[in-house]
């Protein structure tokens, strides 16, 4: 188990050194929007006497400012979230095994076969269950030891050790909750970035593009600079009047530890395309037309889950999450 935790920590460390494709694409889009905004602000004469156009430009600037703040938070290594839990988990599991062994010893000495069977089952499961289940095991073991404090003393398990085990159990629960909240904050941040990117894109498509084109004859240099960055893309296969603005996103996590899985491959069958999850286990497919899509997932060391079929309507944003089961829980 310690070796498995070591591998997990090394994996998390390596992932923090890499900006995954999803985050790179996010930053690229943000930089593009900032460049467009800068080009427009460098031509203030084009906005003179046009309050609606000025409000439009201000909205684009506000959107970019919010994106900058959110992206700066998510670039921070996710290992800073996981590391405290991983460090405490090592000590907690060792203590849990010790107390479990004490229960087995006492149950054997007093011929309590029911308790002995339960504790032996726990022994097998310790390396294979989720962290919150480990906490529940610890609480149960502590409760079972209370009536046998005398026997515990006789085998060298004094009240100081029992108190320390209870403290460690409570600390483990606290850090599980703290980690969960921190990860949720990152997920919310990703969702906000996603929404802001879409809002920014809609602002550009429905307002800024038209403004630049209308004012192009009077400000040709502004239009040329803007369009050289904008470069609108249209699919040859799709109707140019129909904007492909649906998307599918989600996260991939370890079903036992709850740790996000980076570099997992997410496939979109209908597009014959593959994305990889970032350090938070997040992925995103954008600019999808209405229709049915099959989302698949693969990560080395995990069982392959069933593909998920979803249907996008009216430029929807759909979420498809995957909780993967390790092939060998001990090493994950």
Image: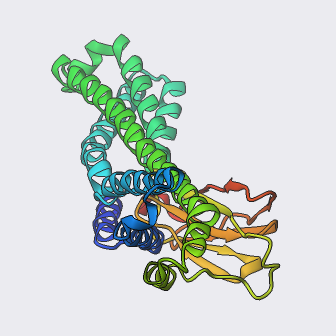
Would residue 324 be visible to someone looking at this image? Answer: no
Name the spot of residue 244 as percent of width and height, x first. 72, 70
Q: Nearer the viewer, residue 9 or 17?
A: 17
Q: Residue furthest bottom?
A: 236
Left/right placement of residue 307 relative to residue 36 reads right
Left/right placement of residue 309 relative to residue 164 reads right
Q: Nearer the viewer, residue 96 or 210?
A: 210
Q: How is the image coloured?
A: rainbow
Vertical arrangement, residue 171 with respect to residue 39, above or below: above
Quarter of the image for residue 275 reads bottom right
Quarter of the image for residue 92 reads top left
Quarter of the image for residue 26 reads bottom left
Would residue 215 be visible to someone looking at this image? Answer: yes
Name the spot of residue 222 as percent of width and height, x first. 44, 78
Residue lying at 66% horizontally and 63% vertically, measured from the top left: 247
Q: Nearer the viewer, residue 12 or 212?
A: 212
Vertical arrangement, residue 129 with respect to residue 22, above or below: above
């Amino acid at each position: 188990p310690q070796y498995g935790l070591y591998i997990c920590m090394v994996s998390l460390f390596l992932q923090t050194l890499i900006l995954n494709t999803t985050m790179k694409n996010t930053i690229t889009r943000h930089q593009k929007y900032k460049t467009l905004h800068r080009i427009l602000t460098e031509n203030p004469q084009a906005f003179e006497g046009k309050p609606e156009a000025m409000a439009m430009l201000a909205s684009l600037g506000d959107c970019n400012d919010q994106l900058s703040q959110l992206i700066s938070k998510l670039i921070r290594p996710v290992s800073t979230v996981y590391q405290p839990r991983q460090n405490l988990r090592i000590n907690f599991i060792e203590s849990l095994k010790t107390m479990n062994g004490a229960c087995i010893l006492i149950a054997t000495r007093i011929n309590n076969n029911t308790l002995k069977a339960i504790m032996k089952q726990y022994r097998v499961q310790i390396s294979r269950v989720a962290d919150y289940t480990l906490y529940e095991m610890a609480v149960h073991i502590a409760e079972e030891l209370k009536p046998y404090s005398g026997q515990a003393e006789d085998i060298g398990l004094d009240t100081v050790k029992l108190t320390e085990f209870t403290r460690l159990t409570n600390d483990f629960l606290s850090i599980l909750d703290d980690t969960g909240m921190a990860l949720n904050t990152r997920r919310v941040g990703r969702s906000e970035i996603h929404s802001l990117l879409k809002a920014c894109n809609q602002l550009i498509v429905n307002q800024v593009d038209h403004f630049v084109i209308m004012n192009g004859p009077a400000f040709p240099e502004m239009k040329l600079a803007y369009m050289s960055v904008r470069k609108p893309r249209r699919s040859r296969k799709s109707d140019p009047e129909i904007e492909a603005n649906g998307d599918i996103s989600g996260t991939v996590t370890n079903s036992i530890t709850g740790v996000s899985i980076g570099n997992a491959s997410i496939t979109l069958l209908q597009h014959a395309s593959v994305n990889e999850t970032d350090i938070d286990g997040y992925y995103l497919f954008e600019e999808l037309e209405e229709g049915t899509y099959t989302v698949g997932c693969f990560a080395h060391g995990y069982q392959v889950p069933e593909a998920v079929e979803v249907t996008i309507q009216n430029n929807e944003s759909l979420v498809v999450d995957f909780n993967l089961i390790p092939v060998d829980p001990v090493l994950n």
